[in-house]
Image (cartoon, rainbow, N blue to C red):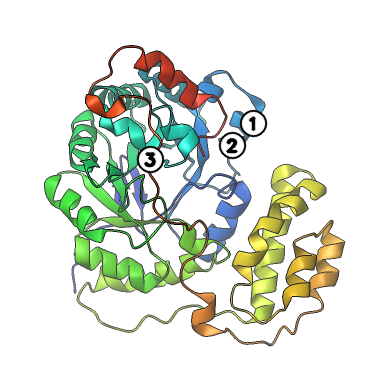
Amino acid sequence: MTTAAKPALQYGKIAIDTPVVLAPMAGITNTAFRRLCREFGGGLFVSEMVTSRALVERTEESLRLVGHHESENIRSVQLYGVDPKTIADAVAMLVAEDRADHIDLNFGCPVPKVTRKGGGAALPWKQDLFASIVKAAVKAAGELPVTVKMRKGIDADHLTYIDAGKAARDAGVAAVALHGRTASDYYSGTADWSSIASLREAIPDVQVLGNGDIWSAGDAIRMMRETGVDGVVVGRGCLGRPWLFGDLQAAFDDYLRNPDSNAPIDPIQPNLGQVADAFRRHADLLVEFFENEDHACRDIRKHVAWYFKGYPVGGEFRAALSQVESLDHMDEILATLDRTQPYPGEEAEGPRGRLGGTKTCALPERWLESRELVGDQRSMLAEAELGVSGG
């Protein structure tokens, strides 16, 4: 009997049989999309990011974002915040009202409106603030596991991930996830998996997960082997491809049984009819989530390009579906497809979602002069958390 080289992820009392985490994506990973992905394969499926301030203020939108369907056996919530007390209050609320089983803290957002005020991927530069936020969250969470997701740093000259990883470990987190890009990298180029391996080596006494450029199950297994991580975080790779979680579960079932196996991975390659069915199922789940068919149809429009990437459906079809007004209208459009069209191969694979080149990370004035908060920077930080979502 072969012993698996790596166990499934263990977050406190929570065992995750397939060591795959769905990355929180604003406007994407709502209950509907999480349910759809879970229908294809296993893992941990994290909610959209919600700001701690909005949650403490109990805004309607924040409470909707942290809601879960009764079928979600692990209620995972990602919080974004810049103040230890507000984070602690938000976590305490989630615990007291039994709204979560796991809490993830986001320190990886590269969006200029957030980093310009010192939030997101800019925050770990301030070592005292980062450590105090994580400590406050872990203390308030009690027995609930807390994890951290972050980027390498601000740019190549201002890396923070090793220091931040050690601080998170010392605070008592269950795991640290690293996206192998800096804030300045945004979503450009190729993710630096060597940084993920370096973090794994630097903190061998806590679980480490890798994120960045996992477009297939083969990429996930390759990351495991090249970096030694305990699991992977998948974001843009599953956009319009919820069946990727089926590929990942099958690949990890084999890998965990026999880590040295070089057996070929047999990915799911849906024909056009199967893609249409998944798209329609997604729409149904959105109707249930929003409790509003019109809202659901507006929301599904942004997924059209991702689902039908590479398939020969034509511009008129894409344009029509991108303006869909009702489920009946959707059915009429989908009925025009040749459902027997086979999987198009590489044209349907690879990068999707946010791209773009590198950019200078927008930062507060004199932010890089000290690794600690100085002057009025703490009051300025509050402006980085004005919305409901940090994305």
The residue singled out by tag 2 in the image is 65
Expressed as whole percent of the image width and height from the top left, the position of residue 116 reads 43, 31
Q: Residue at x 19, y 56 (%)?
A: 197
The residue singled out by tag 1 in the image is 61
Q: Amino acid at mark 1?
A: Glu
**Is 63 drawn above or below residue 160 in the view shown?**
above
Q: Residues within 10 Å of mark 2 (few under 14, many from 20)?
A: many
> Tag 2's secondary structure?
helix
> Tag 1's secondary structure?
helix
Nearest to viewer (mark 3 / mark 2) = 3
Asked if marks 3 and 1 touch (Cβ < 8 Å), the reply is no
Label located before the other in sequence (3 or 1): 1
Q: Amino acid at mark 3?
A: Cys
Q: Residue at x 35, y 73 (%)?
A: 218
Expressed as whole percent of the image width and height from the top left, the position of residue 253 reads 34, 70
In the drawing, what numbered circle is on residue 361?
3
